[in-house]
Structures are given as structure tokens and as C-alpha cells.
Image (spheres, grey):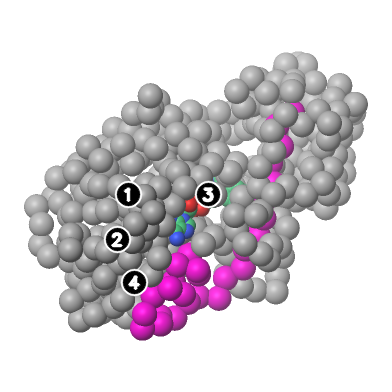
Amino acid sequence: MKQYDVVIVGGGIHGAGVLQAAAAAGHSALLIERTGLASGTSSRSSKLIHGGLRYLESGQFALVRESLRERAIHLRIAAELVELKPFFIPVYRDTRRRPWQLKIGLWMYALLGGFDASTRFGTVPRREWPALDGLKTHALQAVIRYHDAQTDDALLTRAVVQSALSLGAKIAMPAAFAGAELSDEGVTVSYTEDGQRRQCAARVLVNAAGPWATRVAAAIRPAISIPDVDLVQGTHIVLPFAVTAGIYYVESPADGRAVFVMPWHGATLIGTTETPYRGEPEQAHPLPAEEEYLLAVVRHYFPAFEHLTREHITQRFAGLRVLPAASQAAFDRSRETIFSADRDFKPRVLGIYGGKLTGWRATASLVMDRISPSLPARTRRAATDQLILRRPA
Ligand SMILES: Cc1cc2nc3c(=O)[nH]c(=O)nc-3n(C[C@H](O)[C@H](O)[C@H](O)COP(=O)(O)OP(=O)(O)OC[C@H]3O[C@@H](n4cnc5c(N)ncnc54)[C@H](O)[C@@H]3O)c2cc1C
């Protein structure tokens, strides 16, 4: 039976990140992905590499600081894939957050981002408002401008896997994890590939199956504890008009939630919603009510596109957030990543629940810290904050 130091289930951004980090640390590593790279949540996100300005309101300062640090690293190592963009927050007479509140938030954002050039912010002068893609100016009091970054989440995931493969990592795809047996030495992992049942041995199994992580964990024997998480659906739609000046960060007229209106391949991507989800993760799909909610945002802020209806939607997709189970609204829940190990010392299984696209590299590095006591000593090949990520062909 083939033996690996680390076997990873799930070829989303987290699985890709752990594969790369394990290979960079000199370990033998195998990634098992059922469908295709980034076929789950990692191609259905808002595609932002961002600090998460709104997380300041819920006091998640450590998350914002880490995300801003990761944003800076992406701009250096993934310049072909991650681009800094202007973000515009229009403030109308009835907008909930006032300009002074936003400016305090952006000042903290700049502080947590180490006041580097990308954290500069200000107000768009009134004479420049006509350049804002037809943004509604009735009752508009101010437009705040700051910067965050946009990527292509699926391409980024593929680029990280490409980097891992160049360091000697292996991948089985399409291949479905079927179960695992824990022993004193590690884990025996079973999966199916080409219609055949296969087995390999690992010192550690990393469960990076995103919304399927609880299912993967439930197939491990003896049984391990599984964190109590909820799935929350987020839908995006693409409409056939082009915003070009930057990304608009607006309040939904329905409930005040933040929604992004973003340039996307010559069209406009709008998202997202937060709908509690129960059911099989692979069956998540945009609901008519979610599409109407997002269309209402466009109609409200861009009067020239008031006529757009669901028939004009050219693309739609829904992704599932993994959030700690709680009674409060999804919007207000922690976005910190949850790690769950089968045991504190020398874990044989480590599960990643939740997290951010932005934080994949930091998350992978924390995973390596947690599992390294279970792994043999190896010679490091590279540091992941120095590995340049190339746009995949
Ligand atoms: C609507 C929405 C918007 C978001 N926007 C942003 C954003 O703008 N910026 C940001 O930083 N974060 C964002 N996030 C968060 C980010 O997208 C996720 O944290 C991240 O993509 C999760 O990646 P993952 O690798 O954990 O899971 P996934 O990408 O879902 O990957 C899991 C993989 O596991 C595979 N798998 C499942 N079961 C098996 C099995 N039995 N065998 C083999 N493989 C299996 C699946 O096929 C899948 O490819 C957003 C999330 C959502 C839902």
C-alpha cells in the first residue's frame, strides 16, 4: 500500500493550500478530489481577496488583520491572478452607515493593514460621480473610495495545485474518498478511482471537503467528534451590463445587508445572499427569491438597468458557507476557521470547517503547525509566502 505523510480530501482552495504547504515542507502528499478542482465553494465565492471591512463591525480584528496581511502577500506572489481594485461605498440620505462611521472603519482597516499604500482611502469628488457607471445620484451625499482585491477563485485554486505538483505532490482526480480507519500508526484511507476501490496509508488525513466535511468526517472509524456547523447558501448572478470603474459595496434596499456589484469578464457579478441550507451540498442552486433580491439591488442603485429581470441573468451560481451553528443571523456569525482534530496530541485527522478564500495560505500554515507533531522530519523545500503563483494555462 502506498504511504504518504499527508492525504487531503477536497480540491477546493483549502485542500490545494494544504497540499502546497505539505509539499513545501518536504512531505509526501496526496490530494483526493471527487469532481474537479474548485468544483465546490471555491468557484462560487464573491472572488474577493479582502480584509473584510464589515468584519470590523463584529469585532473580528484578528481575522481582518490576517486577511489584510494575506491580501498583501497575494498581491506580491499572485500578481497574475489578484488585482487591487477601487471599491466605492455610496452614502445616501437613508444609508445606515454614515460617512464618519465608514471613515473610522477605514482608518482601522488602514491601521490593521500597516498603513501600506493599498490601504489609502478617501471621498470621490462630486465632479467625478458621472464616471461611476450610472450610479444613482438622487439623495447621494458622499461616495467613499478604498481598495481591496479581486481574483478568479477557480483559477487561483488551480494555480496553488499547480505549485504543489511542481513541488512533488500527487493528486487523484476524479477520485472519491470512501472512508478511513484510524490506527496507532496513522490512517488507512479508502477511495474509489476509475471505478476501482483503492487504499493508501497516511500519517495524517486532512479533511478539506468544505460543505461536505461533516460527511467525510462521518466516514472515519472509530468515530471522531464532528463540530456543529450550519450551511448557509450564498447566490451570485451575472447580468449583461458592464461596471468598469470598480466594485460597488452597497446596502440591500430590502434589509440593509452588504451586497457587492462587481466587474466580471465584461459583465457584472452581483452577490451575495444568505439563505439557511439543509440538504445535499451538491444540490444547492440559486432560488428565484435570491435572484430577485439581487436584481432589486441593481435596479435601486443603477437606474439605467431598472428594466433588468431574471430573464436577463446570463449566469447564476450558489455556494455554501460553513458557519458555526448558532441562532443568530448568518451575516453576524464568526468567519474564523474551525479546526477539528481527532485528538489534541499527534492528531491523525484534522478537519477544516469554514474559512475564507483570502486566508487559504494562512489556514494551510496553521494546519501544518497542528499536524507537524504527527509527521516525520523532512527537509523544507520552499516557503509558501515566497512561491510565485502563475495563471494556469
Ligand atoms: C457565497 C460565498 C461567497 C464567498 N466570498 C468570499 C470572498 O469573496 N472572499 C473570501 O475570502 N472568501 C469568500 N467565501 C469563502 C470561501 O469561498 C470558502 O471559504 C472557500 O472557497 C472554501 O473552500 P474549501 O476548500 O474549504 O471548500 P470547497 O471549495 O467546497 O472544496 C471542497 C471540495 O471537496 C470535494 N469533495 C467533497 N466530498 C468529497 C469526497 N468524498 N471525496 C473527494 N472529494 C470530495 C468537493 O468536490 C470540493 O471540490 C465565500 C463563500 C461563499 C459561500
* Mark 3 closeness class: few <14, some 14–19, many ≥20 residues within 10 Å: many
Residue found at x 72% / y 29%: 314
Q: CA distance from mark 4 to mark 2?
A: 12 Å
Any mark on residue 180, and which? 4
Q: Are marks 4 and 2 in contact (CB under 8 Å)?
A: no
Q: Disc 1 beta carbon < 8 A from ligand 1?
A: no
Any mark on residue 40, and which? 3
The residue to which callout 2 is attached is 198
Residue found at x 17% / y 63%: 1
What is the x, y in percent for residue 145? 64, 31
Q: In the structure shown, which secondary structural element does the residue marked by tag 4 occupy?
A: strand
Marked residue nearer the N-terminal end (3 or 2): 3
Range of residues picked out in magenta: 213-239
Q: Disc 3 beta carbon < 8 A from ligand 1?
A: yes
Q: Are marks 1 and 2 in contact (CB under 8 Å)?
A: yes
Q: CA distance from mark 1 to mark 2?
A: 11 Å
Q: CA distance from mark 4 to mark 1?
A: 16 Å
Residue 292 to residue 227: above or below:
above
Residue found at x 34% / y 28%: 390
The residue to which callout 1 is attached is 172
* Mark 4 closeness class: few <14, some 14–19, many ≥20 residues within 10 Å: many
Left or right side of 312 for 124: left
Left or right side of 262 for 117: left
Marked residue nearer the N-terminal end (3 or 4): 3
What is the x, y in percent for residue 103? 65, 42
Q: CA distance from mark 1 to mark 3?
A: 16 Å
Of badges 1 and 2, the one in the foreground is: 2
